[in-house]
Amino acid sequence: MENYKATATSTAPPAVVWRLLLDARTWPAWSTVDSLVPERSSGLDPDGRDPVGSVRAFRAGRVVTGERLTWLVEERQLSYVDAFNWALRDYRAVVDLAPTAEGGTAIHWHGTYHPRWGLRWVLRRTMREVMQRMADGLASYAATQSPGGK
């Protein structure tokens, strides 16, 4: 089993970071995905408050992967598993948010997975790099969405 850990800090408060994380429609603006794929997604909330059980499908290049939300703790934690992903098996990820003393948000994005045969060495590095870019993108974009953000 492989794993990754990514951390970032945003000047935005947890409520702003949470709103972006929960609303799959915002992900192309701040993450490494190119687009949300509505026809492969299910259970998405029109107001951007995707519930547990919803499947969010994202396109990155020619690849479409899906994640199913499994656990939500308002402004604190979002967990998901792979709904469909050709490169990974048993993928589980958690995004923890914690308020900082300065009023911002500490983001800790971590996950475990089994790579498909032949992809272990490629995915080990790629997942760590991509997920760090996801955390950094969320942190910086949230800061631009927050009143007084930097």
Image (spheres, rainbow, N blue to C red):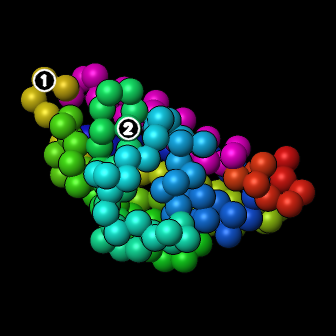
Q: Tell me: residue 149, above or below residue 136.
A: below
State left or right for residue 10 relative to residue 74: right
Q: Quadrant of residue 21?
A: bottom right
Q: Tell me: residue 91, above or below residue 2.
A: below
Residue 69 visible here: yes
Estimate the x, y position of residue 122 in percent, counting from the top left.
Answer: 28, 22
Estimate the x, y position of residue 58 in percent, counting from the top left.
Answer: 38, 44
**Depth check, front residue: 103 or 140:** 140
Instruction: Give the secondary structure at mark 1.
Output: loop
**Depth check, front residue: 68 or 3:** 68
Disc 2: which residue: 59
Estimate the x, y position of residue 150 in percent, counting from the top left.
Answer: 85, 47
Question: Mark 2 and mark 1: span between their CA atoms?
Answer: 22 Å
Q: Residues within 10 Å of mark 1 (few under 14, many from 20)?
A: few
The numbered mark at residue 45 is none
Residue 7 visible here: no
139 magenta-colored: yes
* Badge nearest the viewer, 2 or 1: 2
Q: Residues within 10 Å of mark 2 (few under 14, many from 20)?
A: some
Q: Which stretch did the figure color magenta?
A: 120-141
Q: Tell me: residue 96, above or below residue 31.
A: below
Circle nearer the N terminus (2, 1)? 2
Residue lying furthest front: 39
Estimate the x, y position of residue 109 in percent, counting from the top left.
Answer: 48, 52
The numbered mark at residue 118 is 1
Residue type, mark 2 in image: Arg
Q: Residue at x 69, y 63 (%)?
A: 16
**Depth check, front residue: 83 or 11:** 83
**On-image quarter of the N terminus:** top left
Residue lying furthest bottom: 74
